């Protein structure tokens, strides 16, 4: 049996590919648990500087595999707590950039995974559907958290209520993705973008992610204090020393090398 999660590491970019193309990468438990395990491995592995999540074939992810639902020995809530919720939490808390590279349709929980990326890159063949209401379910896996923050409460509700397909250009207009690349060159364009990010000071970016996550639910004063604490950590790090040295020596900083040296 082929693996449901493919891993490939290139230029510090770990690409995780959901690999059930015949079902548009509809998610079963091995796929969801496999993705979470891969993210935990990526968290510990210094060779991984950026993670890309994408899909094999013409789909990104069609959400829960509907063929599996009837055969389960657990309820919906328990299933979500066991599979999707840890995955989405890990994507958001991983202190390395996580890019979702949406190559095709992202539906249901697949749309939630697409939106959970720190940066969302769409192919011009991609689309996103909050498809849950078609089968009389509630949006899950974080969609009720991400979507209203991106498009506002009312637009989010309309997308959820009517389950209309949002194409790539509309996704860009609505702020659901940062860039749209042609389908023909998508994988190469994603790798180029991700490698550019991998050359950045990823430890500082991890702390930036931590700061942004905290700021989502904090007051201004709490945020100012938290920024000060994180700046202390970043300012004592090897990446910062390299950034300053490179500036003074009028050269490009080598943050990859700095990441390998021991932080003070
Ligand atoms: O605890 C819990 O599990 C709750 C969690 C719920 C989370 C959810 O994600 S609920 C939402 C589940 N997803 C859906 O309802 C989406 C169902 N799929 C579709 O609506 C359509 O397939 C798409 C709009 C995504 C794409 O349409 P199209 O026309 O491009 O492709 P297609 O022909 O419908 O699908 C291609 C194949 O993939 C097809 O198989 P076949 O006929 O070629 O053998 C289709 O059955 C299969 N497929 C697509 N989505 C799923 C799926 N098989 C199983 N589960 C799917 N979700």
Image: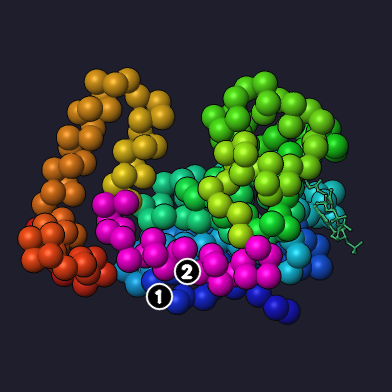
Identity of the residue drawn at 74% across and 69% down: 57
Q: CA distance from mark 2 to mark 1?
A: 10 Å
> Would you say residue 198 sits in the magenta stretch?
yes
In front: label 2 or label 1: 2
In the image, residue 100 lies at what x, y percent? 56, 55
The tally of labels here is: 2
In the image, residue 5 lies at what x, y percent? 61, 69
Does 97 sit left or right of 33 as displayed? left
Quarter placement of the C terminus: bottom left
In the image, residue 259 lies at what x, y percent? 23, 66
Q: Which residue is mark 1?
A: 11
> Would you say residue 54 sits in the magenta stretch?
no
Does 67 sit left or right of 15 as displayed? right
Q: Secondary structure at mark 2?
A: helix
Identity of the residue drawn at 68% across and 26% down: 155
Magenta: main secondary structure equals: helix
Q: Which residue is mark 2?
A: 192
Q: How would you rate the neighbour count of disc 2 (Cα within 10 Å): few for under 14, some for 14-19, many for 20 or more?
A: some
Q: Is mark 2 within 8 Å of ligand 1?
A: no
Depth check, front residue: 88 or 131:
131
Q: For residue 12, which quarter of the picture?
A: bottom left
**Boundaries of the magenta span:** 182-205
Picture layout, residue 14 above or below residue 67? below
Depth check, front residue: 74 or 52:
52
């Amino acid at each position: 049996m082929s693996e449901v999660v493919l891993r490939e590491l290139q230029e510090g970019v770990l690409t995780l590919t959901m690999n059930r193309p015949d079902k548009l990468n509809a998610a079963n438990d091995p796929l969801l648990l496999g993705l979470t395990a891969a993210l935990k491995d990526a968290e510990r592995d210094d060779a991984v500087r950026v993670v890309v999540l994408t899909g094999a074939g013409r789909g990104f992810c069609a959400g829960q595999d509907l063929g599996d639902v009837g055969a389960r020995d657990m309820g919906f809530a328990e299933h979500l707590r066991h599979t999707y919720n840890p995955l989405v939490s890990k994507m958001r808390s991983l202190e390395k950039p996580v890019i979702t590279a949406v190559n095709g349709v992202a539906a249901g929980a697949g749309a939630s995974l697409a939106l959970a990326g720190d940066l969302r890159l769409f192919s011009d063949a991609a689309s996103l559907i909050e498809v849950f209401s078609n089968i009389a379910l509630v949006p899950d896996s974080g969609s009720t958290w991400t979507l209203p923050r991106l498009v506002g409460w009312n637009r989010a509700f309309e997308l959820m209520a009517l389950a209309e397909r949002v194409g790539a250009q509309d996704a860009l207009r609505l702020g659901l993705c940062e860039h749209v690349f042609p389908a023909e060159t998508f994988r190469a364009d994603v790798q180029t973008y991700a490698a550019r990010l991998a050359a950045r000071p990823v430890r500082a970016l991890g702390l930036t992610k931590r700061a942004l996550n905290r700021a989502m639910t904090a007051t201004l004063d709490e945020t100012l204090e938290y920024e000060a604490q994180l700046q202390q950590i970043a300012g004592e790090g090897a990446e910062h020393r390299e950034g300053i040295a490179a500036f003074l020596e009028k050269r490009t900083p080598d943050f990859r090398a700095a990441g390998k040296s021991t932080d003070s």
